[in-house]
Image (cartoon, rainbow, N blue to C red):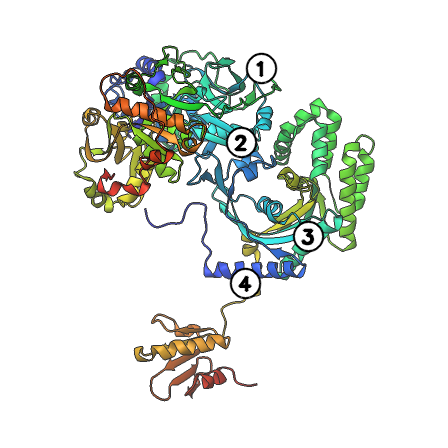
Amino acid sequence: MGVQRAKGTQDLSPEDMRRFRLIEGVFRDSCLKWGYEEVRTPTLEYLHLFTSTGTLTPSRLGRVYSFLDWDGWSGERVVLRPDGTIPIARLYIEDMSERELAKLFYVTNVFSFEATGKESREKWQCGVELIGAGSTAADVELLLLALGVLKQLGLQDVEVRLSHADLIRALLAKFGLNPEEQHNVFDRILDGDAEVLAGMKSENPELGKTLATLIDLKGGSSGFLKNLKALFGGDSKEMEPALNNFIKTVDLLEAVGVNYQIDLASGRGFEYYTGVMFKLVIGGEQIGGGGRYDHLIPLMGGKPTPASGFALYLDHLMRLTRVATLVGPSAQKVLIKAEDSAMKEAFKLAAILHKAGREAEVDLGSQQPSEYKWLITVGVKAPRFVLTNRTSRKKFEAQTADEVIKILNPKP
Amino acid sequence: MTKQLKIALPKGKLLPDTQALLQKAAWGMDGYVDGAKIYRLKSSRFPNLIGKIFHERDIPIQVAIGNYDLGICGLDWVEELLSKYTASPLVKLRNLGYGEGALYMVAAGLKSAPAVEAIQAGREVVRLVSEYPNLAESFALKNRLKRFSVFPLWGAAEAYPPESAELALVAGKPGEQNFNHNLLAVSEVLNFNACLIANKNSWEREDLSELLASLDGHFPAATKHPSLPASRKTGRITGSYSSPKADENIIKLALADGHQQSPTVQLLSKAGIRVDDYPSKTGNRRPVIGLEGVTVKVIRPQDMPMQVANGNFDMAITGIDWLTDHLIQFPSSPVAELLDLKYSLVRIVVVVSNEVPVENIAGLKQYYSGRAAPVRVAAEYTNIADKFARDNHLGVYKVIPTWGATEAFLPEDADLLIENTETGGTIARHNLKIIGTLFESTARLIGNKDSIASLAKTKRIKAIVETLRAAVSSPPPKGDIELNPSLSPSDLHTESRKSETNWDFSKGRCLK
């Protein structure tokens, strides 16, 4: 068995890391401008943090990386963070609950077993959580922040698909499904399992029709939702608060000029969400998503606190971000060569150049000079520094480091 | 059929019916008998078929990893593997119609079974115990338990509720509703029969048709097909649940089942301590001990260190082998060794096949250094085996957990064993040799440090230790028991467990 990385994991190459840092940088800058603060939670959490809310589905919890810690004789397990939002909610409850409003963001990895080998078992997310704001404006702000990041990354044709968790719940509850069955049934419907729907229709044909209509319908305006409300008006009292909330959000999105598609089926995986949910899609590939989760913090033992958030999937964005928008290695790199006797001077010069804001490397014997703009040979005797501009093929001589900097940065 | 094919066959309760099936199919596997001394089998009808006898629980794993093309075992163990490792390359070929059983999640209840929700409501952490830890965990997740601990057990799960666990996943007869100790079925988790399984690759690529055809027509008529592993509840259970009030003053003592029972009884009787119904002919796991304020439960010695560490028991009698294994996994565990009881002496040894030209532990590293494949270390003591491999720089290795009959793994399915032995006879009979002794193990009285330090218990624990100490060192039975309350808890600590740094398996001995 040779040396190899663990199955389902990935390395990030220098090229990958340039993409990663670019995306992360754009994301951080945007969040900071909107007044969000960066946080980081531990990789290891108690498993019960994720089981206690009762919101994550058994199939998701069945794929976590959990184990007994070195002091785990109580039998309780720890887990490699399988979700970004729940640890932030934990952090808020534990350390920040005196704050009325917590605007937090993070760049983090999450771990979940994936058997097909098509995706990594360690995924990176850029996440934002807006805790303490329950208004429609809060949902819209998050969506604008997310879209702003994607725009700055030069990504076009971003589709916004909207769904509403409470609306789906209200629908499924009409079929007498308990919360445990709701996720299961909804996921099966979305997987195209006609039997589930057929079974429900035969028990309650009217409802089945309503559900099928709602899930199939797609629309691009609040008028669409208002029509829906009118269509099912009489027999859908339970759906009314959710529909009204949905319409209000959509009206504001229209006012600020965000294009969207209403698609209830995009509510897949609505586990802890309560209100409006959104998915961000580029070319059929989901690159992010989020929504409102007003019950999560109280379910975890905190005060009733409205909250919403989203995550952008870094791994997907890394594939989509075009190289043209990347900052490549600097075209002004400097390579410093020296005899053994002049090594001390070479390192001294490198330090001075770094301080002056230049990228400068000391030759370790295997650098390719062709990758550098400047070669500087350092000697013990005069001329102490010989500079070669590899583009113009010109040579310069210098006696001091200051003179070197002057030659590298000619006054315009 | 040209390529060699391998089948893993069960020992234990499925053996007689499996033996009958193979006889009817005229496989001619003569050595496949109850109490077989040799685990490797040949078929006189199919010259390319070889078989091996395993503990039932090992069979799905052996088939999934591709060591065996076919296997026969209970569906319960197949589902135990698949419930956690859903992607295992395993194909369930056929219900064999015998070995019928069912897995039940049971809890203590007087008239009606309590609802899972009621159990969660009354407990911060719900404790589940089972020999089937993966199925137990999957049950906890499906039922959305908010906070739970799953304790994998070697056995005796039915002894735990209600004091030491809320829920136990146990095997029983199909349709069973009432279990020992007032336990009731909260949920029927699985109906199972013996089944024929295949490795997915073998099933897709090898010609197994002749073998499979030979079995056809010889299956006993199945009374019931094993259900899919649906966690179906027995009715809609809405019963209430009240956690038993634990008396903080009671000292909870665990005694071992199995062959440790008779030397334990001898020692206790020498110490003037009577235990009624232990060993029990009826399988009673709660014998009454003649010590005021002490209750006894009978569980597996393997499970004791963990159960003492988590406070389910204050004291237990188990082997230093199992305590060592526990302390390697949990170096800061609050379990202390209180007294060496000097019986049940076994050696924990390193074993290889006679064909391996290695005579001592030092030679192992060199012998395996050039090998590309991982060194496979099979052991019931998984943590000792892991530490042994690390300390001896075996390089790329894997530990294969086993549930008994570990000798059967060498040489095909493992490269070395960490095993216990009294005389070395079994090892020699399987054409194996001992190349080193890690340490000698005897029965020990162990205790929970917090219990020992607690005001309510410290004096009585000390008294019990001193009584047993006197019994260990003096041959004649004693009359009056002189309790010695002058000993302080710290005296107990001084002879408590050796720090883990004292175990250095690279020297081939446990240094003390």
Instruction: Determine whether the residue tagged by mark 3 lies in a helix, strand or loop.
Output: helix
Instruction: Report helix, strand or loop for mark 2.
Output: loop
Looking at the image, tell me whether mark 4 or mark 3 is earlier in sequence order: 3
Mark 1 vs mark 4, CA separation in Å: 67 Å
Q: Which residue is mark 2?
A: B125
Marks 4 and 3: CB-CB under 8 Å?
no
Pointers 2 and 1 in contact (C-beta within 8 Å): no
**For residue B217, above or below residue B512:** above
Q: Nearer the viewer, mark 3 or mark 1?
A: 1
Q: Which residue is mark 1?
A: B112
Q: Which residue is nearer to you in this view: A19 or A107?
A: A107
Residue annotated with mark 3: A142
Residue farthest to the front, as pictured: B486
Amino acid type at mark 4 = Val
Q: Amino acid at mark 3?
A: Leu
Disc 2 residue crowd, few under 14, some 14–19, many 20+, Cα 10 Å: many
Labels 3 and 1 positioned on one and the same chain: no
Q: Residue at x 19, y 43 (%)?
A: B363
Q: Are marks 2 and 3 on the same chain?
A: no
Q: Position of residue B294 (x, y in %)?
A: 42, 20
C-alpha distance separating marks 2 and 3:
37 Å
